[in-house]
Image: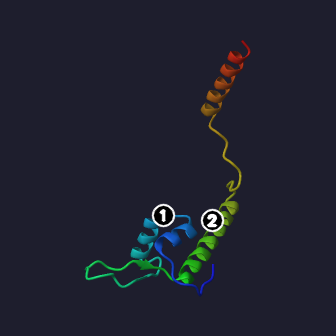
Amino acid sequence: MNADGPPLSCREVAEALGVSARFVQKLVHAGALEAFRLPSAGATDRPGRLRIPRSRVIAMLARRRIANVANVANRANAGKQTLDIAPAPAASLRRREKRCAKTSTSSSR
């Protein structure tokens, strides 16, 4: 993403971050993401649409990547499994075995 391009809409930022447009609006209103409003069209009292500078989106993506790396490192240091899939509960395995047994007996008939 080029930092010098035109500012992005909430929808464009949402696609870049992998979240909803409403979540991006909430980030802006909470002050976590800097944005500005376009002039409103016509004589309405409604504020203009939000635009977010590309440089702010790039900075947020960088912070997010750093946070993800830090979380993985913290889990690894704590001895937790970070990349392995957690084993299924025993009850779930028993149900799966019963389903497999039923299908194998019904298909052998």
Between 1 and 66, which is closer to the camera in this rendering? 1
Q: Are marks 2 and 1 in contact (CB under 8 Å)?
A: no
Residue that numbered label 1 is attached to: 20
Would residue 24 be found to the left or right of residue 61 on screen?
A: left
Instruction: Choose the circle earlier in sequence order: 2 or 1.
Output: 1
Q: Where residue 104 appears, x then y in whole percent?
A: 71, 20
Number of on-image labels: 2
**What amino acid type is highlighted by mark number 2?**
Asn
- Toward the top, the furthest residue is 109
Dot 2, how many residues are within 10 Å of its Cα: few (below 14), some (14-19), or many (20+)? few
Which residue is rendered at x = 55% and y = 78% of the image? 57
Would residue 49 be found to the left or right of residue 70 on screen?
A: left
Report the disc number at residue 71.
Answer: 2
Dot 1, how many residues are within 10 Å of its Cα: few (below 14), some (14-19), or many (20+)? some
- Picture quadrant where residue 94 is located: top right
**What amino acid type is highlighted by mark number 1?**
Ser
SS under mark 2: helix
Between 95 and 3, which is closer to the camera in this rendering? 3
